[in-house]
Image (cartoon, rainbow, N blue to C red):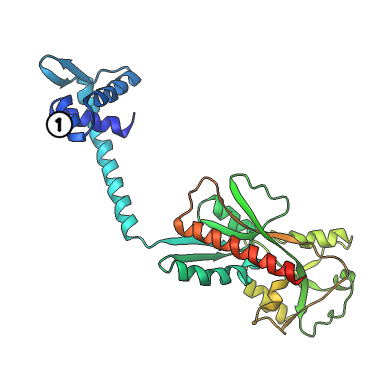
Amino acid sequence: MSIQQLRALMAVVNHGGFRAAARALNVSQGGLTKSIAALEEEYGIDLIDRSAKGVLLTARGESFLEFAKAILEETDRADRWLKTNANDASPTVSLGISIEPSIRLVPAVLQDFRRIMPDVAVRLTQGISHDLLSALRESKIELAVVRLPRNFDAGDLKVERLYQSEPVIVGRAGHPGARATSLRDLVKFDWVVAGDTSQQGAMSDDSIWELFDREALGRPRFAAISNSLFSIVSMLMESDALARVPRALLEHPLVAKNLIAIPVEEPPVPYWIAIVYKTTRRLSPGGQTLVAMISSFARISRAIVGEAS
């Protein structure tokens, strides 16, 4: 059963015949007849009594007509609502960003995006990768630019890797462990990590586990788990806690000279930053433009870094 078949049936009833109904709907009479015949055949019920006296509804056709009217009325209401909201609503793009891309990548792109599409509002949600990817799967956001978790199963998500980032261990300027050369020298300090504060012990920074496990140093003490970059930076600046953060954070003017990198000899564990969206959801025009601009900016940045090295 389709809306088209219901409209055909209603038109035949309202106009008293197939010929007049076909003219009203601007379709061929043969096509209209086939449409209603297909509906009757699908359910094995005669809805129209075709006789020399004209077109009349059968008893079952009379009963079914009430359902058809109700369905078409609701369909028309839904159509009006969609058209009204499409005309009135301001276009938006809902974008989720994790800590790394929120420092440099996304702010740089948004400035150009606003010049190109000034009427499109960008709704930003900052959080940890796990939360943002869950929100993406639930269609709460349209796009996510995040650090890819290890062993990430994309499933129904489209993943475009943008660049690899190298984390560093940081502490406040003048930190007592500033001259440490090995991770072993830093085990005694507390650590601040990015994670889900709503779940006991949940973390997104699995590189912390990987780093300490690889060096057989046991598990570090956690001073705090936070999903806010501002909170993490504040705790680092006001305590002797350490954190493993993107190197790009040290270039931010609010952090420069307040936080320092501690260059231990153990090699860092790099990770990928990627733009992610659902394959089953059509991107809005603004979303398509933002994806293209973020991808282009990442390619140009990689080329510049490659030339510099």
Query: Residue drawn 55% across and 46% down?
Result: 279
Q: Quadrant of residue 223?
A: bottom right
Three-letter amino acid code at the position of disc 1: Asn
Image quarter hosting the C terminus: bottom right
Query: Residue drawn 30% across and 34% down?
Result: 3
**Tag 1's secondary structure?**
helix
Residue at the farthest left position: 53
Camera-side residue of 290 and 144 = 290
Query: Residue drawn 12% across and 19% down?
Result: 54
Number of numbered tags placed on the structure image:
1
Percent x, y of residue 156: 58, 45
Percent x, y of residue 305: 72, 69
Residue on which disc 1 sits: 14
Q: Quadrant of residue 105?
A: bottom right
Camera-side residue of 131 and 24 = 24
Q: Residues within 10 Å of mark 1 (few under 14, many from 20)?
A: few
> Vertical placement of 8 versus 294: above or below?
above
State whether residue 13 appears in this view: yes
Left or right position of 14 against 303: left
Left or right position of 288 against 243: left
Left or right position of 296 against 36: right
Q: Quadrant of residue 262?
A: bottom right
Image quarter hosting the N terminus: top left
